[in-house]
Each structure stands twice: as structure tokens, then as C-alpha cells.
Image (spheres, rainbow, N blue to C red):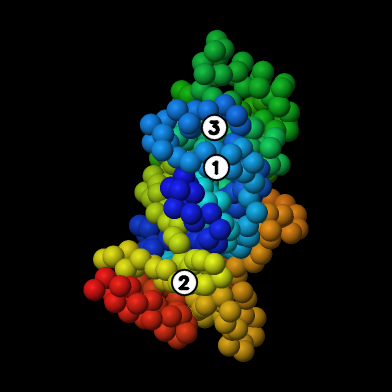
Amino acid sequence: MAAGYFQAGKTKDRATFEMFVRRMPYNRNFFLVAGLEQAVDYILNLSFEADQIVYLRNLPQFHNAPEEFFEALAHFRFTGDVFAVPEGTPIFAGEPLLTVRAPMVEAQLLETYLLSTIGFQTTIATKAARIAEAAGEAGVVEFGSRRAHTPTAAVLGGRAAYIGGCIGTSNVETGFRFGVPVMGTAAHSWVMSFQSERKAFEELQKLLGNATVYLIDSYDTLEGARIAASLGKPMWGVRLDSGNLLELARKVRVILDQAGFTDAKIMATGDLNEYRILEMTAAGAPIDLYGVGTDLATAVDCPSLGAVYKLVELDENGVKRFTAKYSLEKHSMPGAKQIFRYATHDEVACEWECPAEADGVQALLRPVIIGGELIEPLPKLDEIRNYAADSLKKLPRVCRSLYGSENPWKVRYSPKLLEVDKEVHARIAGVGK
């Protein structure tokens, strides 16, 4: 497409694209935006090396591409503008979470990466927020690296899960790169590598001290708890990974308390998701920490966000033309927009509109890159996580439900935006005739 724009003489056209989700995914009442930091890094550093350009030249699809196209790639740098909602913002269907305004070629080239990194991390952050909601006062640790689709997905998934409310991750690379607290335990292979469970626990305690977490279900869970308690301090706690976690947690709690370990923690793992955790929370399970792997790292019940990146307006030689898609079930709204968040609803409006007077109304889309330059440093990860927690608390309880609700948060289009949409539709229908 980029080569085609060159060939068609559209290199000076200035395009505006918006990224949004058409409809809420399965059992989701909101989605929590994540991945902007990686998107910005990509945009600011996108360039093409000589060997990459040679490769493109040799593809049959580019045999008719003009020479100017390859010359432009050799000097490519993003020169446009980017507006986005901050990471950690709850967003709803039909709302633009990111806007790119740039020369047509530049804006188009960003599409796949933006959809990939923001779509994936938003999916995981949303899943993590649901799990954290179900866990209540208990903490949640992201444990899914070995089940993530790639090592890179594991690292970024750990980052997104932290934004969504997890207190840490088992992925050490995530901790190294982003400062996310790292947590984990020894595996069953540790226990089985020693002649006895007691010996395995003793050696673990020598290494970890106050951070010792005993995995006690390799053989007999309750006996494992008794052995752990018999070793005395130091100890953080124990981990349950199989069986009836609710029943076992109650019995293990008694064993620990009777041995004087009232401050020892109980961690639960083993094919957990928000629904199983919600059941245990409701039953008053004495579980302090949940480690969630597969369901979180792959968002099993909703592994794809379905985000799209659509052209909404085009400036051709100083003349602005609104664009929109009107195919069945894939209608997009024309023109660059702003989201105004009120206490009870959101309004999606034309970018030049002002919000109605109201206490606390927020314009969610904010400038991030102007003229190819980052306008201010992006927030630190802990700031994003805290902002996400505060933003989620402001949503009504129905939005935070684990079950899909119809219109849990009202999203309205402004009268002016609806008017523009009607005019564009009429113009396109007239051209079609």
C-alpha cells in the first residue's frame, strides 16, 4: 500500500487514522488500555536498513514500485502526531483509544504493529483486572510465561498484567526491563530431586530464608504442611497446586496456626481463572495469594481484542475529506474525535467540540507525539498501575462484573458527530450512483 501511494502521487496527503474496538469481546464490560509505551518506542524509532530495502526490492510485489519509494524508505522517520488515551484507562466499544495524523505512507505503515502490541497488552491487562477483582483482598501473581504464545508475549504479558492489578510476575525478564516485582516458587522437580521432602525443604530454606515458599503437594499435601511447619522459621509460606484448593487451604491454615505460624501465607495455583477464584473468595478461602498462569497469559476465554485501525479523514492539498466505512456490521464513524468522560457516561465527539459543562468531565485523548517528537516523558509503570486501579474503582459495579452486561456504561455520539456521519454517508451514496 505504501508503494502504491507513492505511485498514485499521494505522498503529500495527510491522513488521520483511529484505533478502536467495534464491539465488546465475550463477557467483557470494559477493556483496560495497555501497550502505549511499546507503541511509542516503535513509532519514534521506525526505520529501514539497507538489507531490508534490498529484500523488499526483490519481492515480486514491488517490481513495479517507483524508485522514489525505496529512496524514501532509506530516509524514513515518523513526522506526524499521535494522540492516545493514557495506559490504564478503561475504554468501551466505539471509542478511539489512539489517533495517528501523519503523511499517508507514515500513518499506514504503523497499522500492524500498533494493533498487535496495543491489542495484545490491552487484552492481558483487561484479563488481569478481572482476576484481581475476583481475588478481592488476596494478591494475584502472573505465572503464565511457559504458556504464553512466545517469549516476547510472556515479557509484555507480565507488564500488562501488572498494569491490570497483579502484584508481580514470575517472569524475571519482565522484572529486569520494567521493574515489576518478581515472585515464584520451586517446582515439583525440586522436591523430587531429593531423597526426602524434608531434605528438599531444608535446602530451600537455606537458600531463600524469609522468602521461602514450600510447594507442599508433591506427595501428601497435609503432611507436606506439617513438615514445613516443623522446620521452624524463616518462612514466607506454602503453595498449594492441586486438589480441592478450598478444603486444603482451610486444613493447611489450621496446621500452620497450631504450629505458631499465624503469619505464614498460603499461595494457590493450578489452572485458576477469575471464576474459580471468585468462588473461593466468596467461600472465605484462607488464601493470601493466587498464581494464575495459562488463563491469564493467553486470556483463554477472550484471546483477541478485535481492534481495528481505520482512516477517518484525509487532507488532500489543503482540502479535508471525511472518510468512513459503511459495510454491514462494520460501520466506522468519520472524522477525528475526542472522548469526553462524564460521571455517568462517555460522549464521543468531533475533535473540535467542547464538552458540556459538568463537574469532573475529562477529555481522554491526549497528545503524545507532535511533529515526530515525544512531547513529554511517558509515566512510570507504577504510576500507570495506580492510575488504572483508581480509574477502575470509579466504574459502577456492573462494569466490573465478570459477566457480560448490556450497556453497562453509556457511550453516546454527539449530535454534531452524528450529523457529520449522516453527511458523509449521503455523499458516499451519491458517488456510488
Residue corresponding to mark 3:
53
Would you call the spot at circle 2 few (<14 residues within 10 Å), some (14-19), or many (20 or more)?
A: some
In what element is the residue under mark 2? strand
Residue corresponding to mark 2:
321
What is the spatial separation of the Cα atoms under label 2 and label 3, in whole angstroms? 33 Å
Q: Position of residue 274 (x, y in %)?
A: 44, 51
Determine which quarter of the picture holds residue 386.
bottom right
- Horizontally, is 338 left or right of 378 in the view? left
Query: Which residue is more in the foreground, 204 or 169?
Result: 169
Q: Position of residue 289 (x, y in %)?
A: 57, 45
Mark 3 or mark 1: whose residue is earlier in sequence: 3
- Horizontally, is 362 left or right of 121 in the view? right
Residue corresponding to mark 1:
68
Q: Amino acid at mark 1?
A: Glu
Query: Which residue is more in the foreground, 296 or 276?
Result: 296
Residue 288 higher or lower than 329, as above or below: above
Furthest toward the right, the residue is: 376
Q: Position of residue 95 (x, y in %)?
A: 48, 68
Q: Amino acid at mark 2?
A: Arg
Residue at 38% in and 76% down: 424
Mark 1 or mark 2: whose residue is earlier in sequence: 1
Whether residue 355 is visible, yes or no, is yes
In what element is the residue under mark 1? helix
Q: Are marks 1 and 2 in contact (CB under 8 Å)?
A: no
Tell me the quadrant of the picture where the C terminus can be found.
bottom left
Q: Amino acid at mark 3?
A: Ile
